[in-house]
Amino acid sequence: MTKWVLWIGLLLASSAHALTAEQALAIARGETDARIEALGQAVAEGDDKTAAYLQALADEAVKIKDAQLFVLRDEKVTDPVTDAALNLPDDAEDVMLNNRLRGELDTALAAIRLFSADVQQRLQSAKALLKEPQAAQRSLVEKALAAENDAAVRAVLQQALAAVDLSSPEAAQRRAAAQVLATSAQPDVLLLLNQQLAQEEDVSVKSALKLAIEQVKRGLQLGENLGTLFTGLSLGSILLLVALGLAITYGLMGVINMAHGELMMIGAYATYVVQGLFRNYLPGAFDYYLLAAVPVAFVASALVGALMERIVLKHLYGRPLETLLATWGISLMLMQTVRSLFGAQNVGVENPSWMSGSIQLMSNLQLPWNRVLIIGFALAVLLGMSLLIAKTRLGLFVRGVTQNRPMASCMGINTARIDTYAFALGSGIAGLAGCALSQIGNVGPDLGQSYIVDAFMVVVLGGVGQLAGTVYAALGLGLVNKLLEGWTGAVLAKIAVLVFIIVFIQKRPQGIFAMKGRSAEA
């Protein structure tokens, strides 16, 4: 950028002056070259007010009418120079910015913030300069580096200086820059090195660039591996939530419930309804709507599941083909009911603010909060279900009916009632899965169809009626699927997983864990 050399030199030599009305107006209108020159002059003589004005321009929060500028912030309209309150005319126009001006504004803001009192601002500014290095920035980066005391900021500034030198006309300087950047495990640095390698002509510099690229790739490999493991664990936790309810219904009663996906869909739509109620009647508590949606989703799906069992399924026990066809018909009815009530289009469910954003662990490793919390939620549901099965009277009855139904009936257990309770429990857990899925994607009538096949694979692979097997199978399939995707692609990974399950079941029909009990031995 041709005008930068002049104003960067001014910035290094000048003391701060307040933004003037003439400078602010010159930046906002006129020819692009003249506006860039005015921008450079304002930055060279600027202060915090200049930075605030430039940030407002970058955020498209400035309007103009004649020679008056208006800054719109927090529902207030002020003058960018005097901060005086103004009335915004109806015919005020937006300040126009082309791509070139946007780039100049971003770099100007980064340059100003290099000398901020806030360490985080300086760090972010240094990273911005590292991402888009320019030869005119060299003196500025050197001055900032000489004045910087924070070790983390100094490290980034040193890399930014090397990134600038990467395009130097001197081969020795380019070679030295490549050696400095080799120690940086940053995706942006890898991109810069590859770009320079593509246009480099000097043999010795090419060799240094190749070595640097290999070293940066090795540094990034750990983050990529951890990211793959996290993605697999995230997928596994979703499969676990989806399959837990199916493990109860299929394991206890042998019901091939083809409507299990639609029970998940009901939980997701229940979450959507609760979100709408909070938005309309409790907007101040919107961030807490998900806490209310969890029990609502469970109850809604559990009630539908109990009705299914009482009205239809209790008459079909022992007839698996009829049960499969009946539940498939119920799934179609449920999908059509949802289409009639909510429409055929997907609906959006917003994340609460505490589920938005991500955790930055490494330069190339970000963990989205919504997926981290869904993993925790899946573990909490698993723990609750384990305690219910192992420590409660209902859990004792469920285990008894699962292992030997005739003997449990002889001992006075109402097996029909246990069937209803167990089916309602499994359906409620499917609703919880739908509630969780609503936080990572759109909610639509076909939501459950994407997961029902995978859920059955998890249950069969883990062992029918075996909770521990369901956990191992869900997490294992999630991790294996994501690891294979990196080598073979998504489609071939799915095929490979399916072939593996078929071969495994051929060799071990009872799954990872065999069911214990007389009925299993019969």
Image: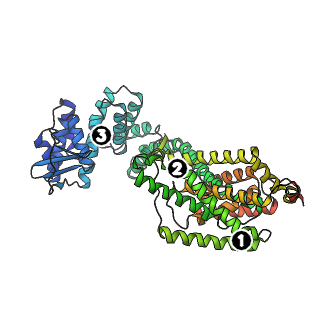
Q: Nearer the viewer, residue 380 or 416?
A: 416
- Kindly tell me whether residue 359 is visible in this rendering: yes
Horizontal and vertical percent position of residue 463:
77, 56
Question: Which quadrant holds residue 312?
Answer: bottom right
* First-in-chain label (3 vs 1): 3
Q: How is the image coloured?
A: rainbow
- Tell me the residue that label 1 is attached to: 324
- Tell me the residue that label 2 is attached to: 292
**Which residue shows up at 46% across the image and 39% down it?**
182
Left or right, 58 with reference to 301: left
Gap between marks 3 and 1 measured at Cα: 63 Å
* First-in-chain label (1 vs 2): 2
Question: Which quadrant holds residue 252?
Answer: bottom right
Q: Nearer the viewer, residue 300 or 119?
A: 300
Gap between marks 3 and 2 measured at Cα: 43 Å
Gap between marks 1 and 2 measured at Cα: 33 Å
Q: Is residue 291 above or below residue 316?
A: above
Q: Is residue 132 above or below residue 322?
A: above
- Tell me the residue that label 3 is attached to: 110
Q: What amino acid type is highlighted by mark number 1?
A: Leu
Question: Which quadrant holds residue 84?
Answer: top left
Horizontal and vertical percent position of residue 39:
18, 44
Q: What amino acid type is highlighted by mark number 3?
A: Ala
Horizontal and vertical percent position of residue 184:
46, 38
Q: Quadrant of the C terminus?
A: bottom right
Q: Residues within 10 Å of mark 1 (few under 14, many from 20)?
A: some
- The secondary structure type at the circle numbered 1 is helix
